Image (tube, rainbow, N blue to C red):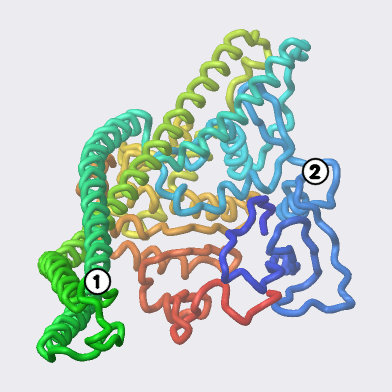
Amino acid sequence: MLGGKGPLRDIPERVGYKHIMMGIETSEGNTHTLLRSVDGGSFNLYAGLYADELPEDNEPTLLHEQHNEKKDDNLSTFLLSLIDLNNSRIRRNVKGDTNSLSFRNIARLLVINEEEIIQQRSPLADGMGISDTANASVFRLLLTGDDDSSLVVAKEKQQEDLSRQAQIDLLNQLIKEGQTEVKNLAGPPNQLDEQLGRLHDNMQSRVEQLAITESEYKKASSDRRLTAKKLEEANNRLADVTALLDRFTLLKAHYDSDISRLQSIEEAGSLFEALGEAECPLCGASANDHNPNKVCVGDTDQVIAAARAEIEKIERRRVELQDTIGGLRKEASLFENRLPLLQSNLSELSSTIEKVIAPNLKQMRSSYQELADKRSAVREGLALYRNLSDLKDRKAALEKLTPQSDAATIAASTLPNSVADSFAQTARVMLEQWHFPDVERIYFDDKARDLVINGKARTSFGKGLRAITQAAFTISLLEFCLEQERPHPGFAVLDSPLLSYREPEHASDSASEDDDLRDTDLKDQFFSYLSSMDDDRQIIIIENTEPPKFIKSQPQTQLFSGLDEVGRAALFVEGETEA
């Protein structure tokens, strides 16, 4: 709502919200309401304060988001006009080039997020180096009321210099983008190199373990396939043997039937021989007509002999068949005993693969992939550092070729000693009222562009005290400007100024034991000081620590609890749409 271009975080709780409204009241009592889409873009400016619906008869003024010094139809010019800083110019580099003051330049000194509040650098530095001169110029403008519009670049740049400067500006932009990217990395290049080495060693060890596990998986799978094949072959053979036994049993029954029939024939033939002379039982001839010298087609003796011969042949076959059936029954019994063991082995192998080896293999592959992804990220980070270093080298080479013109020799603007000392004493009194430990002397180091407390640079304290002294720097700037009737928006936003000192310092942080303020009453005194400030000052604190009871009871204190029944659940509340 102060003109930033970055999109809001895309979180589910944002769904249903369309606009953001911000009310502004000047020291003269004039009120305004700014309205902007949650997707960014231009602003609508309304006269008066509105918390909910806007009146239909109040025609808004359109304000563009981009600063334009030649026009007044943008948010930056409007906000600067409220504090009489429109048409001001600030220095942007050591050559004396100036830019039109934008409200974004001032917002940098008013809105301090949770990362900036603990950084080991000057409150006037953003870590990029490109904007440091402009930030210092804005700081000087707020403290003194004097801008840099009187600076004049003595020598006009040649075309070659302009081309070289364009390249340097492009490299500065690329360097800024690169520094933004490396800021989110795990650490500096030496730490990334060490991490890459550890990842390589871990991956080598994981490869060996993975190879062993994969070998176990392949062997177990091979054993399972072999066992399954044996089980299938045994089932098939048992089925074949069972079918043969059924067929051979039926064949044996036929043999038994044939033998019974032949034995009946043999017995009947023997009876015919015992009857004496009678009609031939085969051809029907009487005894007188029967020629004993001729063989009858149904000669009883021959029939008996043939039946006996056939019985003997079938008996031999039946014996062979009986032996075959016995062998098949033994084989069937063998497979019936073997099948449960094969089935048990197959089940055990399947269970081992599915419950032990396969999950372990999957976990190891996933772990290896995670290490590979981390290694890729580290390599990418190192590549970013190398690219950033290359860009800086190229920029340095171009700067060496840039002639040192008169414009490049303009001395940097410095704060008058009296102003710097007054600002430092404002900070000292404030820290004393906060019960900051052992505050004896403070001065502003114009070269470091930061406070020095008791002879110790502010950036040399631990992150807990850095956060508190950053807050003191920001609020002291507001107090000094308003007390000296200098231009200032009259508000500041601080994210987590007290949270850091509740946690132990990291080993890598150059903090001493006295950086820990957990046993002091600084938090109570901090909030007490803020609550006693004049009404024309506004400090917005976003904090994750428990505030004092006298602060929690005040109407301007808002608790975001995450619970529907306690305080306010969140900044975005379900059901509060179009707000």
Q: Quadrant of residue 18?
A: bottom right
Q: Residue furthest front?
A: 288
Query: Measuring 68% from the left and 48% from the top, which residue is drawn there?
Result: 103
From what the image shows, is residue 240 above or below residue 405?
below
Residue 230 placement (x, y as % from top left):
22, 57
Between the residue at mark 2 and the residue at mark 1, the CA separation in whole angstroms equals: 143 Å
Q: Residues within 10 Å of mark 2 (few under 14, many from 20)?
A: some
Note whether residue 73 is visible. Answer: yes
Image quarter in which the C terminus is found: bottom right
Is residue 304 shown above or below 230?
Answer: below
Q: Residue at x 58, y 43 (%)?
A: 143
Kindly identify the residue that appears in the image at 40 percent across and 53 percent down: 429
Query: In the image, residue 546 lies at what x, y percent?
Result: 36, 71
Q: Quadrant of residue 228?
A: bottom left
The amino acid type found where label 2 is placed reads Asn
Left/right placement of residue 133 relative to residue 200 reads: right
Q: Is residue 165 above or below residue 53?
A: above
Residue under label 2:
68
Foreground: 390 or 261?
Answer: 261
Measured from the top left, where is residue 414 in percent x and y?
A: 55, 30
**Which residue is disc 1 drawn over?**
295
Earlier in the chain: of badge 2 and badge 1, it is 2
- Position of 95 with respect to 202 (left or right) is right
Residue 20 or residue 453, whichever sits in front = 20
20 vs 466, nearest the viewer: 20
Disc 1 is placed on an element classified as: loop
At label 1, the amino acid type is Val
